[in-house]
Image: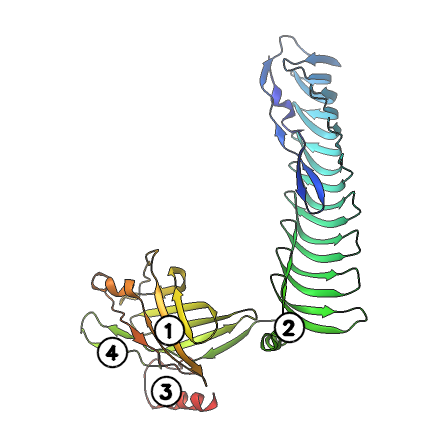
Amino acid sequence: MVFIRNLLTGLLLAVSIAVAQGAITEPVTDIALQETIPELMLGEESWEYANGDTYTGRWLNNKPHGEGVYQRLNGDLYRGGFRNGYMHGAGVYEFSNGDVYRGQWEQGLPNGEGVMLYQNGNRYQGHWQNGLRHGKGKLVYRSGSIYDGYWSRGDKSGKGLLTYRNGQRYLGDFKFNQPHGHGIKTEADGSSYRGTFSKGLRHGVGECSQEGGVIHICLFDKGREIRDPQKLELAKAYYEKHRPTYEYEGGMAYHLQDEFTKARYYVTTENVWWEKNVALLETQLRIRSRSDDQFLQLIVNRYTGPGIYHLRRGEIMASDLQGKAIALPEDTVARLEIKMDARGEIHGEFSIPRLSAENSRRQFKIYDGRFEARSAPPQTSEPGAESRDWLVKNRDNS
């Protein structure tokens, strides 16, 4: 009968990688070769395999099944349950490097509750899935730091508390072993930051407090504190409302040519507008135009005021005269020059050479255009007295 020596598909080898402040040993799978056992194995019999590994214990159909001991030639030793040739149930695996795992197994891998004692002094106790830390668990580093929280496929992920040996603490969201999302970081001196984090760094708006309890709104960009008064005022407004601030202003007009009439004309400001999305750390400008036949949108992701901007494919959206979206070439570039941005108006020019060059076969025409901005999006698509009055009113209030 053939004994498949991947009976220990989940034998752990011990591959050490550095995570946070401690070296964490991640399990990997060792798949054995096939081997024919020439005799029927019964009861508490032993067998030495061709590679030097040995097994002593219960058998079923020439596969380890029940309680047994598996000794590897490299010095690893497993004592515990087996099922159909796989480590299964409760068991203890002692690595030759000194690591020890005690806990539940399923189909050759740690699954369920278990404790891993690492030879470097770290200790993990918690849930495992397919050989990796997954679910609720606690990792105590030999340095004295402690992480108590949730894991996903071996990484700190979800809610957790990380206490450093120097007295620092972080409570909040984790992703890929780093603070990411909402959390509270308390320093050893008692100062703290409550807000958003990105890839381990303070990023966004939050509350900062010094020892003694004085709290103020603070703003960070990838770990760097922003002290610009204007941006701090925006941060305060955002924090109070718990949502982004949106401002809708302006409009744009540009030249285009109707494929059928060959006439060049401006899209009226009643059909064109622009939006500012104030996102604390940067401002996004969206220039939009929509008519009965055609649509165009230009996006400036880091708008800083008057100047020249070059937009790439992902920042340009357009349709043909039939209203179908245009799949723009990878090398499409738009040049946008804003010459004035004041009192609710934007003046400037733009051009999209690649689109203009393809107009004959794409049933649309876009030429170099100039800005004629207004302070709000249209309420009607047709120019008329009502629209003009609305535009005048908004200009006067800007």
Q: First in sequence: mark 4 or mark 2? A: 2
Q: Real-space Cα distance between discs 1 and 2?
A: 33 Å
Q: CA distance from mark 4 to mark 2?
A: 45 Å
Quarter of the figure with residue 185: bottom right
Instruction: Look at the image and tell me whether residue 43 can be seen.
Output: no
Residue 87 - label = none
User: Can the viewer see residue 249 in this picture?
Assistant: yes
Q: State yes or no: discs 1 and 4 in contact (Cβ < 8 Å).
A: no
Question: Disc 1 and disc 4: Cα gap in Å?
Answer: 20 Å
Q: Residue at x 80, y 47 (%)?
A: 144
Which amino acid, by three-letter code, is at mark 1?
Glu
Q: Which callout, 3 or 4, points at the residue further toward the start of the chain?
A: 4
Left or right: 335, with 75 as reference point: left
Q: Secondary structure at mark 3?
A: helix
Asked where in the image residue 189 lies, by quadrant, the reply is bottom right
The residue beneath circle 3 is: 387
Nearer to me, 348 or 32: 348
Q: Nearer the viewer, mark 3 or mark 2?
A: 2
Tag 4–tag 2 contact (CB < 8 Å): no
Q: Which is nearer the eye, 353 or 268?
A: 353
Q: Nearer the viewer, mark 3 or mark 1?
A: 1
Which residue is tagged 1?
337
Callout 1 crowding tier (Cα within 10 Å): few <14, some 14–19, many ≥20 = some
Residue on which the image places disc 4: 265
Q: How far apart are the alpha carbons under marks 3 and 4?
A: 19 Å
Q: Earlier in the sequence, mark 3 or mark 1?
A: 1
Q: Earlier in the sequence, mark 3 or mark 2?
A: 2
- The percent position of residue 56, horizontal first and vertical second, equals 74, 16
Q: Residues within 10 Å of mark 3 (few under 14, many from 20)?
A: some
Q: Amino acid at mark 4?
A: Tyr
Q: Residue at x 64, y 55 (%)?
A: 200
